[in-house]
Amino acid sequence: MFNKVLIANRGEIAVRVIASVKAAGYHAVAVFSEADENALHVQIADEAVCIGPAQVGQSYLVVENILDAAKKTGADAIHPGYGFLSENAAFAKACADAGIIFIGPSPEAIDLMGNKRIAKSSMIEAGVPCIPGYQGEDQSDATLLREAKDIGYPLMVKAAAGGGGRGMRFQMSEEGLAEAIQSARTEALNAFGSDELILERAVVGGRHIEIQVAADAHGNAIYLGERDCSIQRRHQKVIEEAPSPFVSEGLRQHMGEAAVNAAKSCAYQGVGTVEFLVDADGSFYFLEMNTRLQVEHPVTELITGIDLVDLQLQIASNEPLPFEQDDIELEGHAIEARLYAEDPANGFMPQTGKVLYWKESEGEDLRNDHFMQTGCEISPHYDSMVAKIISWGPTREHARRRLLRSLRETHLLGVTTNKPFLTQILEDERFITGEATTAFIDDATLEKASHAAKPEDSNLALAAVLYLIDEAEEESFEDVVGWSWSNAAGMEKRERLTTAETDDVIGITFDGLDFKATFKDITHEITIHAIEGAQVTATIDGVRRSAQYAIDGTTLWLDASGQTIEIENRTYQPALSDDAAGSGRILANTEGLVIAVAVEVGARVTKGDLLVTIEAMKMEHRLLADGDGVVSEVNAQTGTQVKKGQVMAVLDLDESEEDK
């Protein structure tokens, strides 16, 4: 029995868990870092305790701080969420030693399944199908290189202790394998504290299918259908759905029984996931078992009608499962899209900053799991996923259409997101027909995403009008009406607006609230009907529509006609010089933590050499030399936080490079 549950996590994870904890009648305790003091999960909890600075290594990953928060508040149970310490056996044991119930499996089960090498060996012994590969104890480079020849190519190098694509490398041939092994080791050690690796034959174009399992302390174990998580970028899931459009009833049963067998083999108790890779012929192979709840669990909840967090609470209370396998019925279809703060047009670079405006979508059979609020900060210290938008429908097509509309009606201004990329995927014919595999997000898909940010001319014209209205500094739309009539009609105002893709000078004339914006020898006619908060309603070139916008200084964010654009007003700024590649000034491309400095002052480098590595939002960003020369300045220091655009190093480039 327990009465007060501490949620040892943050963001949308904590918000989602708190909802079920409170609905079940328990008292909810939040923990937060100094960066999350005003976060949504802190506001909705019954109590909250600060556990340290923004860095996860000094707050959310510090077991002693979390246990101290439990002691302060009298929490007698801890839910780890998903991520952070949720699969940390030492944390589960520390909870038990402190007399606190850990809402999850035993430390032994976490240990066994938390290491891909040990887990795979265990699954082979249990008769669960596994991908051919190497998972031995001998971790020498020589052994891995020798085993790779026997396995064949294409080949996957994987961190034994990791997940989420970190410490993972794909090899088409032996060439470069030694470097891939070393790179994977380094990344795995930094991310998971272990440089152990496994090798597996790569299944190209397969399906990533995971089975939801639940097991209690009374020997009962069941599966709750499957999820298709094949659509991934850099081995990170982007779109998930349940059930899979590929899986037949017979395959579902075979995989489900294998998943239950896997759970029973490690005496698992809780709600977890067994992941498989499925070939085109229906052959399936064990990938790993996540002993925690998955980010994508809402799609399972929507098609089964089961609250999985509540089920975790019941199992932790030593109650038997409230249903048997035959009781589980899958109804309809659910699809989830992960909204990330990242820039698809710039290599999906993680983004940070202040949220100027947030509005979630509303509608039948829609669900939004998020921690967003207008005015909150998206920090470089944590994962870049800011929300999950989930839809349900009686058919897959119903769910797809509802999700597409929901995405278009989700508005986040102030930070670039992958929303256009998500809509691109949902509108792709391969996704519509259910044919998307792990090879779906290919170079062509990414190339299309990188060009989707070019703004429509009509949106730039609207932005110019909104800038002009903002310059009037009126407090209400009624005041804008008065301002516009009091100004002389016909006088042209010129605005220079730039985006990552464009640089235009737009001439604007107006008569009342009728505007004409001219550039590229085309005039766009715009009539402003209303401005309410962040929403503007206007007729643009004969079409009436609404858009959302926010202005911060000279920057305007516009969400209109399916585009979210960051626009800069440079009307009163001198023309910027072209700081071309080869300047020798190496700038931080994101806000983050310096984790490695590869050069010293006086070192000679060639173009492409690694200089500095920055970690932001669980990703590494490598800053490379932009020419041949000598390092004259190194301003980066390992362990320090840096801002985007900060000078990390300066090179004295060879004269021939400067000439280029």
Image: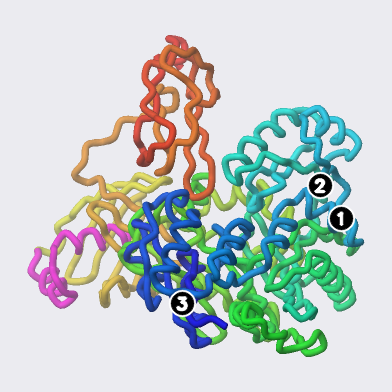
Q: Amino acid at mark 3?
A: Ser
Disc assigned to residue 361: 3
Q: Is residue 121 left or right of residue 572?
A: right
Q: How many marks?
A: 3
Instruction: Examine the structure image and report whether residue 466 is included in the region drawn in magenta.
Output: yes
* SS at mark 2 in the image: loop
User: Mark 1 or 2, which is nearer the eye?
Assistant: 1
Give me the C-alpha separation between circle 2 and circle 3. 39 Å
Q: Dominant secondary structure of the magenta stretch?
A: helix
Q: Is residue 263 above or below residue 333?
A: above
The amino acid on which the numbered mark 2 sits, given as a three-letter code, is: Ala
Give the residue at x 60% y 63%.
Answer: 92
Location of mark 2 (residue): 202
Q: Position of residue 233 (x, y in %)?
A: 63, 52
Residue position marked by numbered label 1 in the rendering: 130
Q: Is residue 290 magenta?
A: no
Residue 586, can we see it? yes
Task: Name the kind of residue labelled 1 in the image.
Answer: Cys
Where is residue 629? Give x, y as percent.
46, 13
- Check contact, mark 3 vs mark 1: CB within 8 A: no
Nearer to us: label 3 or label 1: 1
Span of residues in magenta: 461-487
Residue 41 lies in what quarter of the image? bottom left
Q: Is 586 situated left or right of 37 in this image?
A: right
